[in-house]
Image (cartoon, grey):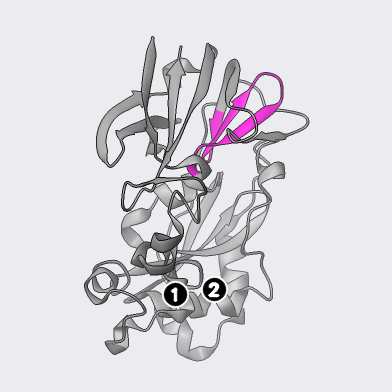
Amino acid sequence: MKLTGNIRKMKSALTDLVQYQLPLYDILEPNLYIPLNELIGQNIRLTFENAIHCVVTGKKINKVFGEGMSYDAFMNSPEASPSIIRPELSRIHEGIALRDYDWEMAHHMQPHYAYISNTSGLKVGVTRTTQVPTRWIDQGASQAIVIAETPYRQAAGLIEIALKNHLADKTNWQKMLKGEGEQLDLREQKNHFTEFLPEELKQWIKADSEEMLIKYPVLSYPEKVKSLKLDTMPEIEGILTGIKGQYWMIDNGSVINIRSHAGYRVSLEF
């Protein structure tokens, strides 16, 4: 079977194992959702069709900025606002929008979690409450627990900033893709690290949060990780041995980050 369309980041659902789907768009319109778990263990071929379309405007572009955006969209779209990467910069709770008032009210003037996850090790992060467990799956976390629930984005960002002196805030993706990692007592870790919060931020600590365990559909992990890009290798073929985070693992030790190829027009054969 051969299916063609523009990539978007994988959709996921948490059951005993994470269940993945690959969305393929017709430029800006959703078209296909391909169940991926059933392809694990099969030979697949992913071919770049020499076209990239901006995920915001749909126009054809030669270079991607952010996740599938044209330069103009990256500089102007609220989806690439500075407060996406740095939540502490959000000021929508003060009525001040960085780019788009309505969009930021809908996405940032909403309850947020500050959390600890175990990806390549312990890290701290921020996400909207509606993005759990999607956010944790996307980063390849095997465990996660909520530290605090805040009424708006900036407050969660301030908690992240307070803990960045004690915890990483980024995932070592190469290490994450080499295995499940050591299981940790996240309740104990949460109690330990919340002691470092300033008193004014402790009001949002979520006392009743439960640890979440996440398992991925992986037959085998690579010993060495070689990342592939469709720009330099327009055809990738091999046995799909697993999916973790937003990465596909191929049997020769290669991996491809699907999310980083948002907007790329591809054909998938299996």
79 relative position to 160: left or right: left
The residue drawn where x is 56% and y is 82% is 197
Q: With respect to residue 7, does 96 lie above or below?
A: below
Image coordinates for residue 54, horizontal then vertical, percent: 38, 48
- What crowding class fits label 1: few (fewer than 14 Cα within 10 Å), some (14-19), or many (20 or more)? many
Compute the Cα span from label 2 to label 1. 6 Å
92 relative position to 39: left or right: left
Image coordinates for residue 19, horizontal then vertical, percent: 40, 30
Residue type, mark 1 in image: Ala
The residue drawn where x is 64% and y is 51% is 184
Tell me, yes or no, whether the highlighted magenta stretch contains residue 138.
no
Depth check: give the residue in front, 84 or 125.
84
Residues tagged 2 and 1 counted as in contact (Cβ below 8 A): yes
Please provide the residue range marked out in magenta: 243-259
In the image, which disc is placed on residue 200? none
Image coordinates for residue 239, horizontal then vertical, percent: 59, 15
Image coordinates for residue 98, horizontal then vertical, percent: 36, 79
Q: With respect to residue 121, does 124 lie above or below?
A: below
Depth check: give the residue in front, 8 or 144.
8
The total of numbered circles placed on residues is: 2
Quarter occupied by residue 193: bottom right
Quarter occupied by residue 27: top left
**Residue tagged 1:** 156
